[in-house]
Image (tube, rainbow, N blue to C red):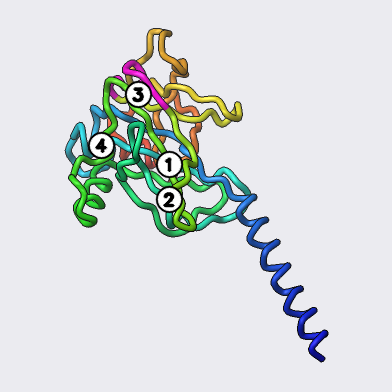
Amino acid sequence: MRKIFRFFLSTVVCFTLISVLVHEGAAQVVLNEFLADPARDWDGDGLANFRDDEWVEIMNAGDAAVDITGYLLADGVGEPVWRYAFSGFLQPGETFVVFGSESRAWEEANGFPMYGLSLNNSGDRVALYRIAAQETLLVDSFEYGDREADDDRSVGRLVEVHGQWAVFDAYNPCSGRCDPPGNGCLPTPGSGNSCLTGISCESWGTIKSVYR
């Protein structure tokens, strides 16, 4: 009887570990797009603000749902300064966008100086970390320059080419010296990086209506 119980227990433990490993391996949370120098009302509060309308978007690029509790945003290099902590679940292909106003509210609630996302217009580094088992792990990061941070230019991953980035510069075309290069598309916070090239829309509310 004891042998049967031990066999059953070891089998349950084995399948549990396999399930965890498959889940972790299938989920891949990455930075997807960000905008450092807003000139429009991106957070939809009716006001354009250089701090509150910055935004960073993450995405689950894997094929399994993932708990994003323990993932945090930071900017700059060196010891991370936390700008926002995530919670909840991301389904495969789902995105989560954080605006500077939400970052500032999180900082206030957690006793941090209220700088928002603090994405420097002269160039900076956006970083996504994960705290697990008392370890702080760098999950993903991207360094950008001053031209990529001009008014209403976002930097995002290309849907068509895995691992490559582009400047989404429909509102403020890059002259060709951006690195990564401009693609003439509109920034798309809160959705996949589909290429919308028309710039007749003057408000983010109009753009969002496309995805409803």
Q: Earlier in the sequence, mark 2 or mark 4?
A: 4
Question: Residue at 44% of width from left, 18% of height from top?
Answer: 184
Q: Nearer the viewer, residue 152 or 110?
A: 110
Identify the magenta region: 143-151
Q: Please tell me the numbered disc located at residue 61.
A: none
Q: Please tell me the numbered disc located at residue 153.
A: 3
- State if disc 2 and disc 3 touch (CB < 8 Å): no
Q: Secondary structure at mark 3?
A: loop
- State if disc 2 and disc 1 touch (CB < 8 Å): yes
The correct choice, above or below, for 172 with respect to 119 in the image is above
Question: Residue at 21% of width from left, 57% of height from top?
Answer: 109
Q: Quadrant of residue 50?
A: top left
Q: Please tell me the numbered disc located at residue 128.
A: 1
Q: Which residue is mark 2?
A: 71
Q: Nearer the viewer, mark 2 or mark 4?
A: 2
Q: Earlier in the sequence, mark 1 or mark 2?
A: 2
Q: Secondary structure at mark 1?
A: strand
Q: Earlier in the sequence, mark 4 or mark 1?
A: 4
Q: Nearer the viewer, residue 30 or 193?
A: 30
Q: Earlier in the sequence, mark 3 or mark 2?
A: 2
Q: Nearer the viewer, mark 3 or mark 2?
A: 2
Q: Which residue is mark 4?
A: 53
Q: Nearer the viewer, mark 4 or mark 1?
A: 1
| 145 drawn magenta | yes
Q: Is residue 22 left or right of residue 56?
A: right
Amino acid type at image mark 2? Tyr
Q: Earlier in the sequence, mark 1 or mark 3?
A: 1
